[in-house]
Image (cartoon, helix red, strand yellow):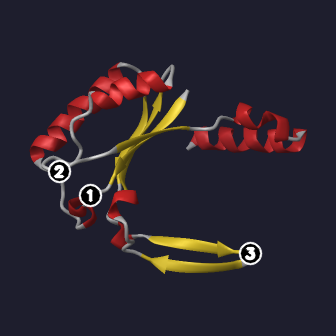
């Protein structure tokens, strides 16, 4: 099962405060553990929402909203993509994570990722072929 592990933003991360050398070292060690265990697919941190934008859809209309965005606790500061056997295994790995926002309360969200099989009943042969073609092109990058 694949999961997205979402590190929630803090006031500091939204202000663009970079992590300390100690946190970078602790996270580097943690990422090495994840890699050695064979579960890490990808990971990265995100710039503050002030550098981002949202596109709101309303029927055919598109509205661009520039950051920063309110409700810091709902924003994302970083993520991991993992392949593990279960949600319980993901929870155990997250519990081993260094506090991503030292000196404050932090939250990490664990969300399962849909796979193509989850949509199998909805995929026509043409859509299935398109999905496979896109996946193959992604692997080539």
Label 3: which secondary element: loop
Q: Identify the residue shown where x is 15% and y is 42%.
A: 23
Whether the residues at callouts 1 and 3 have beta carbons within 8 Å, the answer is: no
Whether the residues at callouts 2 and 1 have beta carbons within 8 Å, the answer is: yes
Along the polypeptide, which appears first: circle 2 or circle 3? 3
Q: Please, is residue 76 above or below residue 125 in the view?
A: below
Along the polypeptide, which appears first: circle 2 or circle 1? 1
C-alpha separation, residue under disc 2 versus residue under disc 3: 41 Å
| Residue of label 2 | 104
| Residue of label 1 | 10
| Residue of label 3 | 59
**Relative image position of residue 62 (x, y in whole percent):** 64, 78
Q: Identify the residue shown where x is 33% and y is 31%.
A: 94
C-alpha separation, residue under disc 2 versus residue under disc 1: 8 Å
Label 1: which secondary element: loop
Q: Please, is residue 105 above or below residue 98 in the view?
A: below
Outermost residue toward the right in this view: 125
């Amino acid at each position: 099962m694949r999961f997205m592990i979402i590190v929630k933003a803090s006031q500091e991360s939204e202000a663009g405060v970079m992590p300390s050398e100690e946190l970078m070292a602790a996270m580097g060690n943690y990422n090495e553990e994840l890699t050695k265990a064979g579960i890490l697919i990808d990971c990265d941190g995100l710039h503050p929402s002030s550098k981002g934008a949202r596109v709101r859809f309303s029927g055919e209309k598109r509205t661009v909203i520039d950051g920063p965005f309110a409700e810091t606790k709902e924003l994302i500061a970083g993520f991991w993509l993992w392949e593990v056997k279960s949600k319980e295994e993901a929870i155990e790995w997250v519990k081993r994570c260094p506090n991503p926002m030292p000196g404050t309360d932090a939250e990490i969200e664990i969300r399962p990722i849909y796979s193509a099989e989850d949509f199998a009943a909805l995929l026509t042969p043409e859509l299935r072929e398109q999905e496979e073609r896109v996946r193959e092109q992604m692997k080539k990058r």
